[in-house]
Image: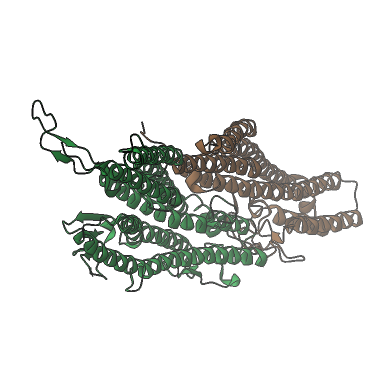
Chain colours: A green, B brown
Amino acid sequence: MSIPTLQGLQTALSGLLAEQQAMDVTGHNIANANTEGYSRQTAVLQTSHALPIASLSAVTGEGGQLGTGVTVETYTRVRNSYLDAQYRTQNSALSGAGTQSEQLEQVQSAFNEPSETGISGQLSAFWSSWNSLAENPTSEAAKEAVVAAGQRLAGSLNQLSTQLSSISAQVEQQYEARTSPTGEVAEMAKQIAQLNEQIKLAEQARQPPNDLLDRRDLLIDKLSALAQVKVTANPDGTDTVAFGDAAKPLVEGSTVKWPQTLTAAAGGQLGALLALNAPGGALTGFGSELDAVAASLAGSVNALHTSTPFFTGTTAATIAVAVKPAEVQASGSAAPGGNEVALAIADLRGGAAEQGYSSLVEQVGSKVRAAQGEQANMKAAVTAISNQRQSVSGVSLDEEMTNLISFQRGYQASARTLTAMDEMLEQLIEHTGKAGL
Amino acid sequence: MMDRITGSMLTGSTLNDINSALAKMQQTSEEISSGRTILEPSDNPFGASQAIDLQSQLDGLNSYTASVNDGISWTQTASSAMSGIGEALQRVRELLVSAGNGTKNQSDLSNIAHEVSELTESIKQDANVQYAGQYIFSGTLSTTPPYQQGENDEYQGNSGTVSRATGPGATVAVSTDLASVLGNGAAAGDGKTLDVLRTIVKHLNEGTTEGREALTGSDLKELDNNIEGMLTLQATNGSATDQLQSTAARIESLHTSIAGALSNTTSTDVAQATIAYSTEQAAFQAALRSASTIVQESLLNFLK
């Protein structure tokens, strides 16, 4: 029956200390309530080692273990790595769709349709100018109008083609900038590798580095916007990060392997950029369709304008009017008043060139719409996953305040226990053995 | 069902709702203010390409209308020139009849011959009428007058046909082959109008008995033939005018229906859009209200 006299003080003290540490953690949570990538932490409380007492009961000789209070075993962060993986997959898709729709919207506004000033309007005006020439085949003014309408049309085709090329060049530039040895990918990979190293050391010391883990997870989240990532957690605490469809892991332990080759299958922003410019991708597709429109325009007009080719060039970038007003041919014969050629060319309205162009506009519109739709869907998916993550890891101020109150009360109660113990000991020390004094 | 709801979830979703409500309102207000439902091809890809096709058809109809109207003016110019020629021929006929009644002496006949010569010149002048700088009776040699004034009665034009577009692949010939009635004059001896008129003048001036008899005999008969030919030409020209006018009416009604289709595809239904706008506005206000009240609620408000 030997219990150390001061054991009760120790027990009360452990309560005080534990409640204080729990309050510290709550304070840390509250301070980081709005920190990006922060996961809430909790102090894991555990009863401390019990004091074995050999024989409690003088009668039965039965022993027991006396509880000695509480200790903080560790601080854990509340995080679900399964949700992290899901979030990153969806985030890659969202960022890919976003990049795609952003670039395609630029293409769409370059087309400037439907409007009177777009290429469809220019084409229509071009046919109408031939109609006017047919009314007055010998008029110099009508011939000049035909050449001017042709030049405007060719100019618009040239301009649109240039705009498509410059969007394509921009796309390439963006890819290069992000993947260069000093670009975003390399920078983030370097930081992840450094964090891997620090985390490994902390794990070796058996001190879970919660905040470092959060920072690494945040970096990987951001990396997932650029391309698909696949994270493998190693026993030593480091993460091996596979990036896009690169052959080797981007980060393994503390080593970074970059630059590597990616393809359109990499996903994310980089994959989308590569897909846009890939052979058979949206940008190249639109470019060649536009060339087909220009070739069909030049071919059909030149076939009827037999005296001399009206257009030169067979691509959207090179098409130009080759004739002077005086060389414009309205008549199919030597007679100046004939208008067969002008009528035949005016009759090309609604033909292959125009149909090709309007179907191209429809394709552009459909692609943009599809990309926008995908972006909206992915945004909803990412929001849902992100909410689930927040539900697990996010800091709820109401919860923290409740915890704070409960820890504060715990602290107060422990202090009261201490006071009671103190009074008890005072009774023993100050007043015991003074009977009759 | 989420176990825990955290502040950032609330603010995040409230912000999302506000943004999407605002985006919808912006789209609708743009539709109302621009009057168009298709601002970008992506708003309605098929509608956009349809709008392009319809607009081109509409532009086509506008140029057909212009060319049909031009054709009508052309045929009307031809018609008035031919009426002038017809009237001149009638006058020649009257003169011919009066010359043949036997009471006229040679000096009277010479005077009549003089008048017929002048009428011949006026017929050639009528044939040389221009429309928009083009000689309308020269076939496709529209820069050359069909007849020269004076002795030479030879036709200077060709037999080419001038047409006006009236629709996709459809044309109407507006030129009239006046030379088929006027002919190439006495040198050709083709019995056509100019040849007959020259013969009449010759007979009037000669004053021979055969000449006088011919005036009311073969000359009058040939003149009547040519007047008949002239009337046929006028009728043909008139039917071209009719055809063009009915085409103009058809284009007009086609224009109305295509413009209607275009408007259905691209124009905003303002009543509908306005109602949609009010609904979206209500949603937006609700999102704002929830942001201003729910998001502010916190345990902190109740702790002392």
Quadrant containing the N terminus of chain A is top left
Vertical side of B183 occupied by A170: above or below: below
Compare residues A10 and A4 and report the one nearer the observer. A4
Q: Residue at x 50, y 70 (%)?
A: A320
- The residue lying furthest to the top in this view is A59
Name the residue rendered at 37%, 56% in the picture: A282
- In the picture, the quarter occupied by the C terminus of chain A is top left
Q: Is residue A125 visible?
A: yes
Would residue B111 be found to the left or right of residue B206 on screen? right
**In the rendered image of this protein, does residue B2 appear above or below residue B113?**
above
Looking at the picture, tell me which residue is in the foreground, A340 or B260.
B260
Image x and y of residue B289, in percent: 59, 35
Q: Say which quarter of the image contains residue B272.
A: top right
- In-image side of A274 versus A346 (left or right): left
Determine if residue B171 is in view.
no
Residue A29 position, x and y percent, is: 41, 48
Residue A92 in the image, given as x and y percentages of width and height: 33, 52
Residue B5 location (% of width, % of height): 41, 36
Seen from the viewer's position, the closer of residues A185 and A112 is A185
